Image (cartoon, rainbow, N blue to C red):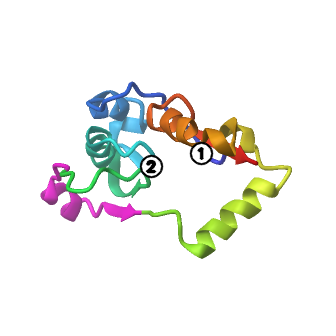
Amino acid sequence: MGASSTAAIQRGGGQAEHLLGLTPDGLGAHIVVDCTGIPEVWADALNLARPGGLVNLFGGCAPGTQVPLDTHRVHYSEITIKGVYHHRPHTFSQALSLLSDPSFPADVLLTDKSKLDGVEQALQAMINKQALKVVISS
């Protein structure tokens, strides 16, 4: 879906050192995206960016969550950290356009379907990581 490379990780974080070894010369990635909202994975993401890299924290953590941050590394390696929330009108409109484009591989993201009366179970499946995104229909 546009990435030059990806790496599968285990749940729970603590894999930054292993993943650094997968990058050219062990320098880290130019762009690191977290979609989990798991604090330990956020910490890994922050440690995986190479100097001048970007960390996109897309997956939101629970309110009040703290993540350790090496301020020296962020400052002197000029790491950009960007929080992204996906419910702004323009972003939502772009997402709908992508999903409605037949050439976009939406089936990679939309893993299950449910009727309206199954919304609670669909949300629980996403929370429990049993489904990525569920399409709800009437």
Q: Which residues are magenta?
A: 67-83
Q: Which mark is residue 3?
A: 1
Q: Was residue 74 drawn as part of the magenta stretch in this picture? A: yes
Relative vertical location of residue 130 with respect to residue 39 in this rendering, above or below:
above
Q: Which mark is residue 33?
A: 2
In terms of secondary structure, where does tag 1 sit?
loop
Asked if residue 24 lies left or right of residue 42, the reply is right
Q: Which is more N-terminal, label 1 or label 2?
A: 1
* Residue 14 picture quarter: top left
Q: Where residue 45 sits: x, y (%)?
A: 33, 45
Query: Are discs 2 and 1 less than 8 Å apart at CB?
Result: no
Q: Residue furthest bottom?
A: 90
* Residue 54 picture quarter: bottom left
Sort mark 2 into few (<14), some (14-19) or many (20+) by Cα contacts within 10 Å.
Answer: some
Q: CA distance from mark 2 to mark 1?
A: 11 Å
The one nearer the camera, 130 or 54, is: 130
Residue drawn 62% across the image and 66% down it: 92
Amino acid residing under circle 2 = Val
Q: Where residue 80 sits: x, y (%)?
A: 34, 63
